[in-house]
Image: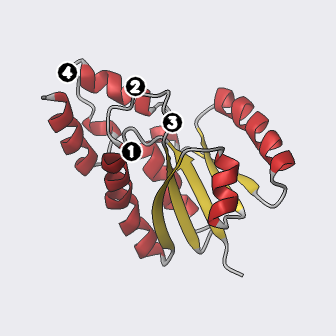
């Protein structure tokens, strides 16, 4: 039976932290599904389609190199329900620090009750990407700062284009 993992997030934009998680997650599963959350109450910088394109552009080659099947999709319901719908038995969650751990442990506990067939796997961020958040990247970009060290090159180009309009 193939190991299918779901890696959910807003990916607004894709960061080097997200890439770090994917680079390790592809070795934990046979198929990685990166799911872009779509929430009507949020106003992302990038459209859903732009985020899906970034996800495909950055993560698909990593998965291919590792011999892991890859899919990018969206979801607008409970993350654990999206995992079940996709057939995932693993949910990948990145951790940067203790605050993330506390929050993610709560989510994992609730998800375990709602979907005992989906196991949460925590992937700790590598030291060099721990401070990176998409929120900080958006703020740096919006204020004209140098965000390039925090995102893949193709994402930096998209951010430059988005912030120059």
- Mark 4 or 3, nearer chain start: 3
Q: Position of residue 108 (x, y in %)?
A: 76, 43
Image location (x, y in percent) of residue 27: 58, 68
Q: Earlier in the sequence, mark 4 or mark 1?
A: 1
Q: Which residue is mark 3?
A: 39
- Circles 4 and 3 in contact, beta carbons < 8 Å: no
In the rendered image, the quadrant that contains the N terminus is: bottom right
At horizontal 74% and vertical 30% (from top left) the residue drawn is 102
What distance separates the C-alpha of mark 3 from that of mark 2?
A: 20 Å
> Nearer the N terminus, badge 1 or badge 2?
1
Q: Quadrant of residue 116?
A: bottom right
> Can I make out residue 37 in this image?
yes
Nearer to us of marks 3 and 1 is 3
Name the residue tied to disc 1.
14
- Pointer 3 or 1: first along the chain: 1
Residue carrying label 2? 136
Is 103 in front, or is 85?
A: 85
Q: Residue at x 82, y 48 (%)?
A: 114
């Amino acid at each position: 039976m193939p190991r299918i993992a779901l890696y959910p997030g807003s990916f607004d934009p894709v960061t080097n932290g997200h890439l770090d998680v994917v680079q390790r997650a592809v070795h934990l599963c046979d198929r990685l599904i990166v799911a872009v959350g779509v929430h009507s109450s949020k106003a992302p910088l990038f459209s859903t389609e732009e985020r899906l394109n970034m996800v495909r552009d950055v993560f698909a080659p990593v998965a291919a190199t590792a011999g892991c099947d890859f899919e990018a999709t969206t979801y607008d319901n409970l993350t654990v329900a999206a995992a079940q719908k996709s057939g995932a038995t693993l949910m990948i969650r990145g951790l940067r620090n203790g605050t993330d751990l506390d929050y993610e442990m709560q989510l994992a506990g609730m998800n375990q009750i709602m979907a005992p067939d989906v196991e949460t796997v925590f992937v700790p961020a590598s030291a060099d990407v721990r401070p990176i958040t998409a929120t900080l990247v958006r703020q740096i970009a919006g204020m004209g700062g140098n965000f390039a060290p925090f995102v893949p090159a193709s994402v930096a180009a998209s951010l430059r284009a988005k912030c120059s309009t």
